[in-house]
Image (spheres, grey):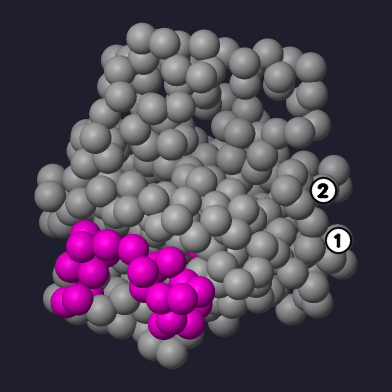
Amino acid sequence: MRVLMLFLDGVGLGPPDPAVNPFFAAKLPAFRSLFDGEFPSLRKQTLTSQAASVLPLDANLGVDGLPQSGTGQTALFTGTNASKMIGKHFGPHPYSTLRPVIREKNVFKQLVGAARRPYFANAFPQRFFDYVSQRRNRLTVTTLSCMYSGLPLLKAQDLREGLGVSADITSGGWKELGYPDMPTIHPAEAGRRLVELSRANDFVLFEYWKTDHAGHTENFAEAVEVLERLDGMVAGIVETMDVRSTLLFITSDHGNIEDMSTKTHTRNPVPAILYGRNHNAVAAQLHTANGADITSVTPLLMDLITERHQTH
């Protein structure tokens, strides 16, 4: 099975209230098409249709306080309860003592060790690489995982050649990053590009941090725009992905944008949205694994991609 994963930073299941939850104020036809017009919320956390399944994952991991990206993403991409390991939630970057865990257990390294082809689809401008050369201790879990696994981080030329996707989906922000001639693309084209990359690799990951950023701003209009751009990308994926061979897996590390009444993270569960191959069986397997929390994700991905466990 091939897996295309969208990691949405700071997306939880919130109240079905368009006054505070932009998921219920934004126009999201692609997302809603997956569940026959419905959308998951705190009130309805589990949905299943012919096309897709969604279920809640706990991001609190048995630790008090608000979940944070450093520990949450370590849990998500290694299968280790990082918050419990260090006794607190920590972020946005991983706690120093978590680096050995990321080095040895990240999903990219595990897949490389299993002779599979992982691919990190985000492209980065030169200023990112300049920054990293000065402050390597400020890398995120995903970029650290690539470094430890020997996977190259994509650059501007890769983005031009269609081999990656910008963190803002359309590449519109690259003009302000020193690339005035970087072509912009429609969100649906970004989705189609991810599908094309998934045909050549066993696991493709795209990270969208704009959701977390919008949640912190408390700017409701920005949050709606960020979600509608994401929905456009999902539309491009749904239109072109082969559901017989590929599973789309959308999840997050902690809540935030789903409750715009606060600019902090939340303790809400995060969604695991599954579309495509064997989504029902995969949802059932995820639901029974480790109490359905975010540490369940990497072991599940390894099972699916390396065929350690067959779903029917």
Quarter of the image that includes the C terminus: bottom left
Residue at 76% x, 33% y: name it: 138
The stretch drawn in magenta includes residue 14: yes
Whether pointer 2 and pointer 1 mark residues with C-beta atoms closer than 8 Å, the reply is yes
Task: Name the residue: 19% across, 45% down.
Answer: 236
Query: Which sits in the foreground, 72 or 291?
Result: 72
Q: Name the residue under label 1.
A: 86
Secondary structure at badge 2 equals loop
The residue stretch that appears in magenta: 9-37
In the image, what residue type sits under mark 2?
Tyr
Looking at the picture, how far across and down is residue 167, in whole percent?
46, 35
Q: Relative to 147, does residue 16 appear above or below in the rendering?
A: below
Choose between 284 and 186: the one closer to the eye: 186
The kind of secondary structure the magenta stretch mainly shows is loop
Q: Where is residue 41 in the image (x, y as percent from the top left)?
A: 42, 81
Q: Of callouts 2 and 1, which one flags the residue occurring earlier in the amino acid sequence?
A: 1
Give yes or no for residue 191 being in the magenta stretch: no
Q: Is residue 310 left or right of residue 77?
A: left
| Quadrant assignment, res 81 | bottom right
Which residue: 65% across, 69% down? 262
Mark 2: few/some/many CA within 10 Å (<14, 14-19, 20+):
some
Identified by mark 1, the residue type is Ile
Image x and y of residue 294, in percent? 57, 67
Rendered location of residue 241, percent (x, y): 17, 48
Count of picture labels:
2
Q: Which residue is drawn at 37% across and 78% down?
A: 40
As measured in the structure, the alpha-carbon distance from the residue carrying label 2 to the one carrying label 1 is 8 Å
**Which residue is tagged 2?**
95
